[in-house]
Image (spheres, grey):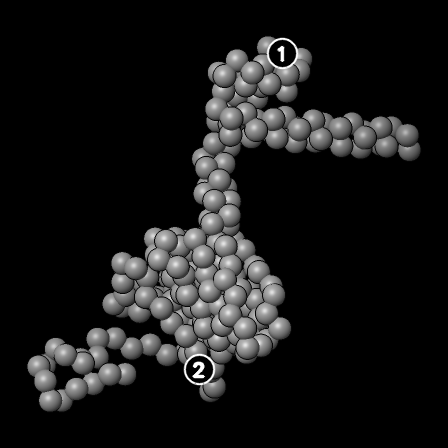
Amino acid sequence: LLRSESVGPQIGKELARTSGPKGLTFYPGVNALAFAPEADRLVVGWGDSRITILQVPSLAERRVLLNHSGEVLALAWSPDGKHIASGGRDGALRLWNPETGDMILRLEGHADYIKALAFSPDGTRIATASGDRTVRIWDSAPAALRWREQQAEILLRPVAEQLVASLEAVLRDAGAGVENLHADASLDPQLCRLALRVVLERESERAAGAAGDFAQRSK
């Protein structure tokens, strides 16, 4: 860690320190790290395939990201702080949600390990450098858009379920009711799609239940 004896007392001062898992006689080294844009978190890539997100300045562990099959060698935080990109020994580029720890996307194409990566300033592209002697640029915008849609669906799901339940109480065909509302522009398109999915899920569950009942009666 950086130290300086020749300048002011705060310059080069060690503020915090962390190490590998406690209780082990051996633990893998740190291969990569990156600050979040707000400098409130630090993402660290380890030689045992783990990625950890640490709180700054305490360096307390907030989350562990698991999916790599080998050493993590490169990390970058998106400019908006909503995604982490990682690369490593297995040659695949991964995109993560740092809040939930979920892997959003896995992209393969390199024939060897990824040793460096970087987001474009607008966060829509990721560049990777590999041991296969190539540099590739990937479009990360679709993944970010899909993630935002998934978050919106999580919030809308209870509304969609309540809507379908209300329609089922007065109509024999809840799906037709949802489509009519959509045709009349009375329903948000995303809520409409989600409500139709709920209808299909419920019909599938009813069909499976009916098949099970029939199988029981046939014995």
Compared with 153, 83 (above or below) is below
Compared with 30, 211 (above or below) is above
Q: Earlier in the sequence, mark 2 or mark 1?
A: 2
Residue extending farthest right: 219
The structure residue drawn at horizontal position 50% and vertical position 55%, both measured from the top left corner, is: 139
- Secondary element at image label 1: loop
- Indicate the position of residue 113 as horizontal and vertical percent values: 56, 75
The answer to whether residue 81 is visible is no
- Secondary element at image label 2: loop
Quadrant of the image occupied by residue 202: top right
Picture disc at residue 23: none
Do tag 2 and tag 1 residues touch (Cβ < 8 Å)? no
Type of residue at label 1? Answer: Leu
Residue identified by numbered label 2: 29
Q: How many marks?
A: 2
The answer to whether residue 172 is visible is yes
